[in-house]
Image (spheres, helix red, strand yellow):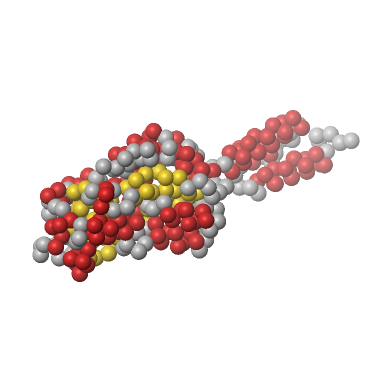
Amino acid sequence: MFNKHTPKYETRVSCVGRVLTRHGRLKSALRHALLVGCGRCFTLTEAAVAIAVALATLTTAAHADTARVAAAADLRYAFAELQPLFEKAQAPHKLALVLGSSGKFMQQLENGAPFDIFFSADVAYPKKLLASGKAIAPVTTYAFGRIVLWSAKVDATRLTLKDLDKPEFRHIAIAAPDHAPYGARAKEALEHSGMWPKVQGKLVFGENIAHTAQLIDRQAAEVGIVALSLAVNPALQSKGGYTLIPADFHQPLEQAYAVTAYGQNNAAARAFAQFMRTPDARQVMTRYGFALPGEVAQ
C-alpha cells in the first residue's frame, strides 16, 4: 500500500494534470491545482473533485460549436440581425456566415466544401444535395422571397416592367439566371410580361442578388430586378424606392435549408435550424419582406 505522500501517488496526480492539460481547454486555476503548483499534495477526494470539474469544463467546451453557414445573398440584411440574436440566445454557439449565390454554393457543397448548414434561395438545391447524400433530412422551407424593380437613380415606385424598353434605361441589372434563383425568377417575370426579347441587349448580370443590387446602387445600371429583402433596407429604399413584381409573373421563390452531411454533428448548426422557427426569427424575416411557410404571397 502507499499513502498520499509517496512518489507513486504524486506521480498519478501529476500525470492526470498533464493528460488534461493536453486538451488545451483547462482554466489556469485548474491546471495550477492539478499540477500541485500550490506547494502541497492533494488528498484523493480533492483530486477527484478537481478532475470532475476539469472534465465538466471539457464537456462544455466540446458542445460549444461554430456553424459555418452558406446563405443565399438575399439574406444579407436579415441574417445580419439574426446572427447576434442567435448567438445571445444560444451562447456559446457562434455562426460564421458566408453569403453568395445558391447555385454556386450547391456546386461547392457537391465538391466537399466545409459548410455545416445551407440556406438556399431555391428549395431545389438542398433537395439535390439530400438526394446525393451531401445533406441530411429534413429539407425545411423557411421563407418565400419576392422580386422588385429597384433603382438608385429614378423613382422606381412609378415603374412597371413595360417601362424597361424606354431609351433612358440603357442598362438593366438582374442576377445570373443560370445559378442565382432570383435571376431565374427575374427572367421568368420578363418573359411573362413579354419584355425578355426587348431588353436582352440591355442586360447586365450580377454574380448573385446582392451583387446585382450593388450594380444598380453604383449606377452601372439605371434599374434592375432585385430581392424585396434587399430593397426594404433603408439605405436602398431611400434612393429610389421599388415596385413589387406580381407573384404570379414567376415561379414561387421557395427558400429552404438543410444541414449538410459535413455538419450533421455540429450542435450550432442544429441549434440555428431550430432558432429559425422561433417568434424572434420569424419577426425579423417578415420585416425583410419574406412570406413565411403557411402564408400566401400576394
* Image: 200 above or below 40: below
Pick out the residue farthest to the left. 167
Is residue 71 something that shows in the picture? no
Quarter containing the N terminus: top right
Pick out the residue farthest to the top. 45
* Image: 130 above or below 85: below
Pick out the residue farthest to the bottom. 201
Count of numbered circles in the view: 0
Quarter containing the C terminus: top left
Is residue 103 something that shows in the picture? yes
Q: Position of residue 164 (x, y in %)?
A: 15, 60
Q: Position of residue 89 (x, y in %)?
A: 45, 35
Side of 259 relative to 230 (left or right): right
> In the image, what residue occupies the spot 43% across and 56% down?
125
Q: Position of residue 247 (x, y in %)?
A: 27, 48
Q: Nearer the viewer, residue 173 or 86?
A: 173
Q: Nearer the viewer, residue 282 or 190?
A: 190
> In the image, what residue occupies the spot 28% across and 58% down?
188
Q: Position of residue 243 (x, y in %)?
A: 18, 49
Q: Nearer the viewer, residue 261 or 41?
A: 261
> In the image, what residue occupies the spot 40% across and 60% down?
103
> In the image, what residue occupies the spot 37% across and 58% down?
101
Side of 63 relative to 75 (left or right): right
Side of 53 relative to 289 (left or right): right
